[in-house]
Amino acid sequence: MSRLHRARPELSSFLRACRERLSPADVGLPAGSRRRTPGLRREEVAALAGVGLSWYTWLEQGRDIGVSAAFLDNLARVLRLDAAERRHLYLLAHARPPAEPGRTFCQVPPLVGRLMDDLAPHAAHVLNLRWDVLAFNAPADALFGFGAHPPERRNLLWLLFVDEGMRERLVDWETQARRMLSSYRRDHARAAQDADAQALVESLRRASPEFAAWWGHHDAGAPCSGERLLRVDGVPLPFEHTMLTIDEERHLRMVVHARRQDTTG
């Protein structure tokens, strides 16, 4: 028996519980005087969701019928589901989570700032989906000079292609810049409908010949962890780096750079 078929009874119970917790007044319907069951009736949910009563009844009974993402989103709206409940609905009905729209704006929780401070002497900074540098600790500022730039230009991709200091910091800049651009493309695909993400790409096309040339290659998929050489006080030094998810729903990640420990001898 497939995972989807095993989820059908749970889907049935979930939909019934969501329907029964709502009152007619919650969805703008008259209460009426002869209600034998709590909450909304099946026919009311079906009408509000724009489907036939028989079809919705089959769904709530856990029958094996196909449902579209558009219908699930509409049903989530009718049943007043929050983000977690909507995700649960998708998992039960499709055996996979919904495709979330990319969002570039978000704020860094104070706890994350304290954690970054505790990571010193390792450099740590926080990125959103657009690769804006939202927060950073003192070692990251010393390594990359984030604090020397105004917040509106404190974007990792912009600094990578436009800032001479960042270019000097990265040993073999071209190789590393291509890899980072490839990694960014995956995030840009999720934020493709975000005006700020599109504006960043257009600005970089005008400001950087390398970006304008490489963006058209559509390379994607470079890993977000590994090792890179950074020039510190004129000396190339190896740093290990990784990207940690802080808030998956808001696309908030922390990037940590740590000096590679010499294991020879």
Image (cartoon, rainbow, N blue to C red):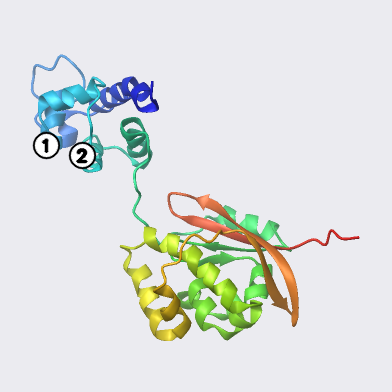
> Whole-percent x and y of residue 63?
24, 21
Name the spot of residue 61 as percent of width and height, x first. 23, 19
Task: Name the disc covering residue 71, or none.
Answer: 2
Instruction: Report which quarter residue 112 is drawn in.
Output: bottom right
Q: Are marks 2 and 1 in contact (CB under 8 Å)?
A: no
Q: Residues within 10 Å of mark 1 (few under 14, many from 20)?
A: few
Instruction: Single out the residue that lies furthest toward the right.
Output: 265
Comparing 240 with 130, the one in front is: 240
Instruction: Pick whichever of labels 2 and 1 is earlier in the sequence.
Output: 1
Whether residue 149 is situated above or below residue 119 in the rendered picture: below
Point 37% across, 57% down: residue: 102
Which x, y percent locates residue 71? 20, 39
Q: Secondary structure at mark 1?
A: loop
Residue 155 shows in the view: no
Q: Which residue is mark 1?
A: 50
Which quadrant is home to the N terminus?
top left
**Relative to 112, is 37 above or below?**
above
Q: Secondary structure at mark 2?
A: helix
Q: Which mark is residue 204?
A: none
Residue at 25% across, 42% down:
69
Task: Examine the rendering and report whether any part of residue 117 can be seen.
Answer: yes
Viewed as shown, does residue 240 lie left or right of 183? Answer: right
Count residues near mark 2 (Cα–Cα under 10 Å), then give few for <14, some for 14-19, many for 20+. Answer: few
Mark 1: amino acid? Gly
